[in-house]
Image (tube, rainbow, N blue to C red):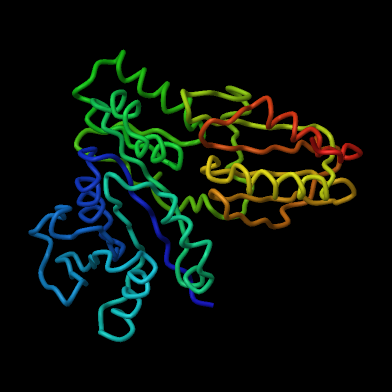
Amino acid sequence: MAKRIPVSILTGFLGSGKTTLVNEILSTKQEERIAVIVNEFGKVGIDQQLVIGTEEDIFELNNGCLCCKVRTDLINTLYALIQAVEEKGHTPFDRVLIETSGLAEPAPIAQSFFVDPELSEVYHLDTIVTVIDSYHFLKHVQSHEEVRKQVAFADQFILNKTDLVSKVTMDQVKKKLNAMNPEAQIQTTLYSKADLRPLFNHFSFDMGEKRLSKKMNVDVAHSHDEDISSILLKSENDMDLQAFEQWFNRIVDEKGEQMYRYKGILSIEGFPKRVVFQGVHMLFGGVVGSPWKTGESRISEFVIIGKDLDYDWFQSQFIFCESKKINIQ
């Protein structure tokens, strides 16, 4: 099977500096050919000096990269890029970078890779990077739901325009981001000149165990924002798989739209390996993970980032999924 093409999602509110970061990536990552997908090519503002030719909606850039505007939907656009290589003679590309509209939320993009198995055979969802306008963030996060969702889905934060704010304000911005999404890493920048190495090749949507909220284990059991919160549920007892499946199916039906991103590692009674699962809203999947080591603490954990999450209710329900406690309330 051919190596899948990694896809990174770049999001952030209007004026945060996304396009500047795209140009920085295109000018810096010369070792890769990158296909850039933007919502509206003529309006988004990819540096016009980079453009050397067009063919329908596929733009070739002078560093060998491609740029493609969204046609009807993202899935069709991703297939169009492959067709541009296989049928129209464009040189193959190494990576896709999707720059979303400032008013867009990342969920539908991430969900595209859950609902189209053929797409996932070609592309490999990598990392969601959210660019933050440090100067306007505290105001925008209060007044715009899109900003709160962009924060909730992030794997990496780029705090831009840091020269425009005081240290006190910057500390407030970081505190707010950590309260809403403590798992995401933070990098501060001027003019979107970021260290690009942390932004790629994390593959945070893979069904692995590497990203299960180590920071939350140290810092907080649960944290609350006004409506967006990040909660960590834990149990030191083995879980009853039947009870958990009943509960999880129910909460996805009832609260899936509130659960922006979630991930769990379970210790199942009588089973020697971890069970790992994660999802976006109402779409989720699971795999068998690594074996539990002899003498290792078999702790089950469930991380949720979402809206209006009642930690006490979730934790009490999670405990009812422990072995011998299958009567879910």
Q: Residue furthest left?
A: 49
User: The N terminus is located in which quarter?
Assistant: bottom right
Which of the 4 quarters of the picture holds residue 43? bottom left
In percent of the image, x 59 and y 22: which residue is there?
220
Q: Residue furthest bottom?
A: 87
Write the residue at 45% across / 38% down.
Answer: 152
Closer to us: 57 or 25: 57
- Residue extending farthest to the top is 168
Above or below, 117 against 245 in this view is below
User: Which corner quadrant holds the C terminus?
Assistant: top right
- Residue 90 in the image: above or below residue 202: below
Q: Nearer the viewer, residue 26 or 251?
A: 251
Location of residue 115 in the rendering, given as x and y in whole percent from the top left corner: 52, 65
Percent x, y of residue 232: 63, 31
Seen in the picture, residue 18 relative to 285 is either above or below; the reply is: above
**Mark count:** 0
Residue sitting at x 12%, y 55% = 47
Instruction: Indicate the position of residue 16 as horizontal and vertical percent values.
Output: 24, 38
Looking at this view, is 70 or 234 the one in front? 70
Find residue 210 and report its image quarter: top right
120 with respect to 69 (left or right):
right
In front here: 205 or 201? 205
Residue 280 x %, y %: 54, 50
